[in-house]
Amino acid sequence: MKKIQTALTAFVLCFPFFSCAPVGDGKPLTQQSFAHLEPIRVRVSNLQVANMAGADPRSMLPAEFSMAVYEVAERYLRRRFMPMGGEGTLLATIEELRITQGRKESDLSVARFFDLDASDEYHVLMKLRIAHQLPDGSVPYGNVVTAQRRFTIPEQYSIAQREAAQQKEVERLFQSNR
């Protein structure tokens, strides 16, 4: 009985140290460069990226969301579409950028009762208008692309794991809409 009590006490005292193991190497996440993508050459003189979704793109993000999706979108567009000379401008306008966060409860009733094993659920939606604007201001053609992604991140993840998961899912947002 004494041995069990001693072992249990030692486990309870050491448990906080087991849960504080470092995750990752502590370095910041790599910035998405999209260097692996083959550029699409467009017959325009330049590319202009605008944000009509709101004045401050950061203000639209939930506090727990670390990715600046607008900045990632701008990097993607500048890497993907390469002006090669021609008339006009390729206008890429982010018309809507929305990130909503919810909470997904556990599927297990015992875990729900103790408020364990929940996940943060994110929905990222971006509407992008791509148009060719001629020097006289007319727009002969264009298109609206809607990209969206839903994903969950378990609440047990560390901050570094959350940021890595968010980065991975935002990257998938652009991969699925090539």
Image: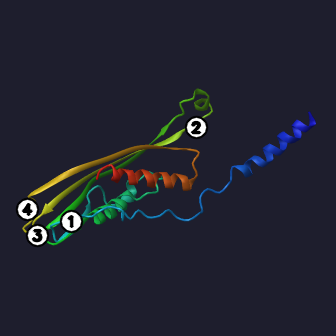
Q: Is residue 31 left or right of residue 134?
A: right
Of all residues, the one furthest to the right in this rendering is: 2
Task: Tell me which corner region of the image, top left, top right, bottom left or bottom right, holds residue 56.
Answer: bottom left
Could you say which is closer to the camera, residue 1 or residue 86?
86
Q: In this view, does 154 lie above or below 26?
A: above
Q: Tell which circle, 1 or 2, labels the residue nearer the N-terminal end.
A: 1
Q: What element carries label 1?
A: strand
Q: Which mark is residue 41?
A: 1
Q: What residue does disc 3 label?
A: 87
How far is disc 1 from disc 2 in space, using C-alphas? 47 Å
Q: What residue does disc 4 label?
A: 138
Q: What element carries label 3?
A: loop
**Label 1: how many Cα within 10 Å (few below 14, some 14–19, many 20+):** few
Q: What residue does disc 2 label?
A: 117
**Label 4: how many Cα within 10 Å (few below 14, some 14–19, many 20+):** few
* Residue 163 image offset from top left, x and y in percent: 50, 55
**Label 3: how many Cα within 10 Å (few below 14, some 14–19, many 20+):** few
Tell me whether the residue at label 3 lies in contact with that at label 2, contact meaning CB atoms closer than 8 angstroms: no
Q: Tell which circle, 3 or 2, labels the residue nearer the N-terminal end.
A: 3
* Residue 161 image offset from top left, x and y in percent: 54, 53
Q: What residue type is labelled 2?
A: Asp
Q: Which amino acid does label 1 sit on?
A: Arg
Q: What element carries label 4?
A: loop
Q: Tell which circle, 2 or 4, labels the residue nearer the N-terminal end.
A: 2
Q: Which amino acid does label 3 sit on?
A: Glu
How far is disc 1 from disc 4 in space, using C-alphas? 21 Å
How far is disc 2 from disc 4 in space, using C-alphas? 54 Å
Task: Tell me which corner region of the image, top left, top right, bottom left or bottom right, holds residue 33.
Answer: bottom left
Task: Tell me which corner region of the image, top left, top right, bottom left or bottom right, holds residue 84.
Answer: bottom left
